[in-house]
Image (tube, rainbow, N blue to C red):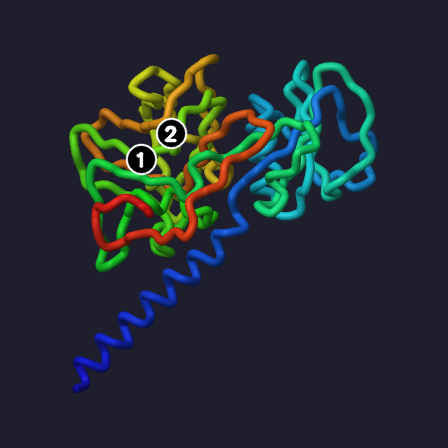
């Protein structure tokens, strides 16, 4: 009876845990609304200034900042201005754009502005193998659950077995022209972030980009941005590491520039106990 009770209790805990992950992740699908030819005019509510390699890198910096709600990116100087105001005063400025974080409820607004849409959120995923650390699984769907944790032991990171070639793949549901890929690395240990290096990115087996890495230790709290070559269109995006080692990382976001963002699959649960894809 005690063993039976413990099994029921454990099963109930896993169900509740899965539901909590499902509910928490609903508000974390990153959508960024863009205003081309404008920049934020005032510095009254500015919360930071950073150098950024691209507009999507600037958007990611805003997303990972605790108080940023909008940003402007000046292309010529590669400067990203972070702002705490969601709708700040803007001014016309050539070769600049304003980036606003956008909630899932707002992402179908049809005001004519383009958006960076995260196409990977809650999509089906597979990978070469799954590492199990005493019941904490490095499942492929952990990378698209929308949770921002960079701690493997919180159950939201990818971790393969040690292999000669390791890989992770997401089915975006349809063909899109991919702009860039953001990948959050592990930040819970002094060396695990190094398992994101020598990474090939392909879209439908076509070359998209390559990341030498690993990131510098001082940069591991912000996503790695890999910009795809212009015009790469496809449905299946794959990250592959040809190093005899494990492959470890946390959240993956795949961005395209669209006017309307597609709906992610719902309902969605992450199958942590098998090699099955997310559904």
Residue furthest to the bottom in view is 1
**Which is more N-terminal, label 1 or label 2?**
1
Task: Measuring from the top left, give residue 203's x and y in whole percent.
Answer: 35, 22
State how far apart marks 2 and 1 are (Cα): 7 Å
**Is 44 positioned to the left or the right of 123 in the image?**
right
* 120 vs 247, nearest the viewer: 120
Task: Measuring from the top left, give residue 144's x and y in whole percent.
Answer: 40, 43
Could you say which disc has been placed on residue 144 in the image?
none
Q: Secondary structure at mark 2?
A: loop
Local crowd at mark 1 within 10 Å, few (<14), some, or many (≥20)?
A: many
Vertical arrangement, residue 209 with respect to residue 28, above or below:
above
Vertical arrangement, residue 130 with respect to residue 52, above or below:
below
Whether residue 276 appears in this view of the structure is yes
Could you say which disc has been placed on residue 214 in the image?
2
Tell me the residue that label 1 is attached to.
195
Q: Secondary structure at mark 1?
A: helix
User: Do labels 2 and 1 touch, CB within 8 Å?
Assistant: yes
- The residue located at (76%, 26%) in the rendering is 39
């Amino acid at each position: 009876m005690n063993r039976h009770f413990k099994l029921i209790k454990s099963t109930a805990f896993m169900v509740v845990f899965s539901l909590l992950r499902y509910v928490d992740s609903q508000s974390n699908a990153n959508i960024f609304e863009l205003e081309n030819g404008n920049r934020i005019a005032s510095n009254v509510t500015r919360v930071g200034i950073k150098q950024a390699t691209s507009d999507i890198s600037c958007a990611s910096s805003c997303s990972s900042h605790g108080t940023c709600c909008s940003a402007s990116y000046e292309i010529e100087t590669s400067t990203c201005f972070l702002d705490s105001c969601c709708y700040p005063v803007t001014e016309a400025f050539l070769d600049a754009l304003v980036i606003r974080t956008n909630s899932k409820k707002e992402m179908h607004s049809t005001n004519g502005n383009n958006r960076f849409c995260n196409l990977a959120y809650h999509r089906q995923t597979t990978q070469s193998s799954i590492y199990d650390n005493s019941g904490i699984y490095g499942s492929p769907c952990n990378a698209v659950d929308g949770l921002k944790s960079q701690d493997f032991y919180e159950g939201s990171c990818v971790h393969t077995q040690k292999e000669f070639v390791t890989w992770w793949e997401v089915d975006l549901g349809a063909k899109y022209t991919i702009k860039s890929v953001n990948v959050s690395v592990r930040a819970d240990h002094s060396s695990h972030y190094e398992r994101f290096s020598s990474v090939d990115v392909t879209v439908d087996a076509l070359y998209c980009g390559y990341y030498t890495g690993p990131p510098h230790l001082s940069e591991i709290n912000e996503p790695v941005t890999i910009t795809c070559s212009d015009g790469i269109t496809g449905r299946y995006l794959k990250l592959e590491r040809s190093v005899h080692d494990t492959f470890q990382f946390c959240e993956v976001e795949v961005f395209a520039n669209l006017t309307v963002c597609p709906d992610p699959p719902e309902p969605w649960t992450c199958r942590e106990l098998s090699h099955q894809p997310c559904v």
